[in-house]
C-alpha cells in the first residue's frame, strides 16, 4: 500500500507514477476506476480543477493506493519511524547471523574452526594494512578474535556499546549466511 501526501502536485505525481508502474494506460485506469480518461489526464497533469473526493478515492482504490488525510508532517514522521525500524531490523539480523556463525564454529571440527578464525584475523590485518577502518574498530575486532575458538564464538554473541557498530562491517563476511530477505 502506498500513501500519498497532502500537496496537490505530489498527489498528481504519485497517481501518475503508480499508474505507470502498474503498466496501466489512462484509459485502462479509467475502466478500472469508473472515472473518465480525461479526468485522469487532468488530475495527473495537475490541472487547476476541483475533483470530487469520491472520484479520487475510486482512482486510488483501482491503483491499490490509500487516500488518507494526515496532519502536516505526519508522513515525514512515519517515514523516519519506518527508516528507524528498518535499521533496527538490519542490526538484529546482523546479530542473528553472527550468532548462527558462533554456533557453527562450536559445532565444526576444531581445525576447521581455527582456520576460519585465522581467516577472520587476516581480514582485520588487511583492514589495518590498507587503513580501511579506524584504529578503534580494528583493535576491538582484534580483541574479539583473540583466544581459543570457544572464546571467539562467545565474543560473537556479545552485546555491548560497540556490538552493532562492529557487526556492520564484519571480518566474517566469507562465513555468514545471507541476510534475511
Image (spheres, rainbow, N blue to C red):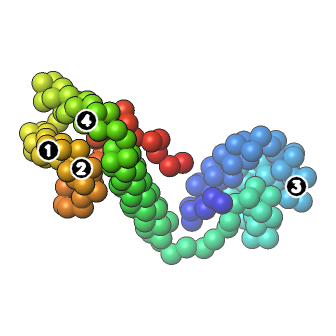
The answer to whether mark 2 and mark 4 are in CB contact below 8 A is: no
**162 left or right of 77 in image:** left
Q: Secondary structure at mark 1?
A: loop
The answer to whether mark 3 and mark 1 are in CB contact below 8 A is: no
User: What whole-number distance in Å separates the C-alpha atoms at marks 2 and 4?
Assistant: 10 Å
User: What whole-number distance in Å separates the C-alpha atoms at marks 4 and 3?
Assistant: 63 Å
Q: Is residue 129 above or below residue 69?
A: above
Q: Secondary structure at mark 2?
A: helix
- Local crowd at mark 2 within 10 Å, few (<14), some, or many (≥20)? some
Q: How many marks?
A: 4
The answer to whether mark 1 and mark 2 are in CB contact below 8 A is: yes
Q: Secondary structure at mark 3?
A: helix
Using the image as rendered, state which of residue 85 and residue 1 is in the foreground: 85
Q: Which residue is mark 3?
A: 32
Q: Which residue is mark 1?
A: 147
The answer to whether mark 2 and mark 3 are in CB contact below 8 A is: no
Residue 30 position in % (x across, y down): 86, 52
Residue 127 image-quadrant placement:
top left
Amino acid at each position: 500500500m502506498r500513501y500519498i501526501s497532502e500537496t496537490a502536485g505530489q498527489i498528481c505525481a504519485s497517481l501518475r507514477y503508480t499508474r505507470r508502474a502498474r503498466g496501466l494506460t489512462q484509459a485502462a485506469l479509467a475502466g478500472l476506476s469508473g472515472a473518465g480518461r480525461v479526468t485522469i489526464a487532468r488530475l495527473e497533469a495537475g490541472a487547476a480543477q476541483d475533483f470530487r473526493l469520491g472520484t479520487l478515492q475510486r482512482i486510488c482504490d483501482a491503483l491499490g493506493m490509500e487516500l488518507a488525510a494526515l496532519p502536516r508532517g505526519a508522513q515525514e514522521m512515519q517515514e523516519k519511524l519506518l527508516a528507524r525500524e528498518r535499521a533496527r531490523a538490519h542490526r538484529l539480523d546482523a546479530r542473528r547471523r553472527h550468532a548462527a556463525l558462533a554456533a557453527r564454529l562450536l559445532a565444526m571440527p576444531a581445525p576447521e574452526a581455527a582456520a576460519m578464525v585465522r581467516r577472520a584475523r587476516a581480514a582485520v590485518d588487511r583492514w589495518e594494512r590498507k587503513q580501511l577502518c579506524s584504529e578503534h574498530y580494528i583493535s576491538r575486532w582484534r580483541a574479539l578474535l583473540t583466544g581459543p575458538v570457544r572464546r571467539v564464538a562467545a565474543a560473537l554473541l556479545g552485546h555491548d556499546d560497540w556490538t552493532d557498530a562492529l557487526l556492520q562491517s564484519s571480518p566474517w563476511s566469507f562465513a555468514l549466511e545471507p541476510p534475511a530477505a
